[in-house]
Image (tube, grey):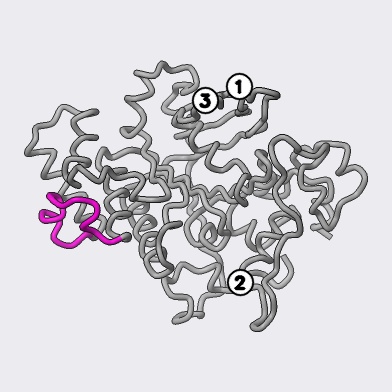
Amino acid sequence: MPGGVPCEVRCRHRDPQRDRSCATAPVRIQRRHSIVSLLEVKNLEVRFAMRRQELIALRDVSFKVEKGERLGIVGESGAGKSVAAFSILNLISKPGYISSGEIFFGGKDLTKLTAREMSQIRGNQISMVFQDPMMTLNPVLTIGTQMTEALHAHQDISREEAKQRAIETLARVHIPSPATRFDQYPHELSGGMRQRVVIAIALITKPPLIIADEPTTALDVTIQAEIMELMMELCESSGVGLILITHDLGVISQMTERAIVMYAGRIVEEGDTRDIINHAYHPYTHGLMDALPQKTKPGRRLNQIKGVMPALSSIPDGCAFNPRCPLVIDLCRTTLPQFTVFGSTRVACHRAAARTD
């Protein structure tokens, strides 16, 4: 991408204003890809059966997550990011349903499991961190009760052992006086503390995979940086796989090794985060990059992508991004683009080759 990305976007410093010395994206860890990935989503399609028509929320979505890998999914509201995450845990509520595709985890197709079988995986082998901790935590139960509940549901453990593990996990997420916090209620904690508790609940069963759905949306900027750094630290120290869902490419560049860009329920670009940040191929990815505040000169209006995400009931023919695309040609309006591979990146765009010139 011409001009690259400002170092405060690419680096992992907590405060980019204090340290602008780094000029490279996070180094991707070389992992040995096992025969069986930790998670593999194949040709996933999700529909919502409305009264007048069926709406397709996800179209032919496929991706993998290796053990200990951090994958980011980015896009505007309505891109399908959260639907993809909820589908993995079978949390799509009616009238939504998985119409086709497979989701393999631990050698099992999660789409084929019964509700009881799925409950043994959800919150045990795959945990989720939601956007708003006040919506996640029960206000009338103590922090300790909510943490040990997950342990008793999935493991044969005594009350004392469960309490001890809960206190140890609270300490791992840097909550001061964890033994005291164990007996407190959510309203007695700050917003940042509550989100740390939610992360602790996700970690307490020692799952191999955590899905974080915009985990810092309800927090102020300073606390956001602390929570992101905490999640990075925990993933690296525990070898936990992470799927991070966000609308912010800056966060993706700091936190993840691979990135997926979604638009109107479809993956439009996927590859190593460093490669996407430094040389994006899809015009939509370029639009997200240009919309970062760091890309706008002081005193000028922020850049934005013209138009809005299409409603599920009115997805355009051909490439769904064509009404907003600055590079659109007639082919874009009639034919759905297939994936083309450029190095580590795969991109669904008829004009992707133009970016290599």
Residue at 19 percent of width and 56 percent of height: 171
Q: Quadrant of residue 192?
A: bottom left
Across and down, in percent, residue 285 comes to 69, 56
* CB-based contact (under 8 Å), mark 2 and mark 1: no
Taking the magenta stretch, the answer to whether it contains residue 86 is: no
Across and down, in percent, residue 229 comes to 38, 62
Give the residue at mark 1.
Answer: 99
For marks 3 and 1, the one nearer the N-term is: 3
Can you say whether 40 is above or below 180 in the image?
above
Distance from Cα at disc 2 to Cα at disc 1: 39 Å
* Type of amino acid under label 1: Ser
**Which residue range is magenta in the image?**
175-190
Q: Quadrant of the N terminus?
A: bottom right
Give the residue at mark 3.
Answer: 94
Residue at 53 percent of width and 57 percent of height: 252
Question: Tag 1's secondary structure?
Answer: strand
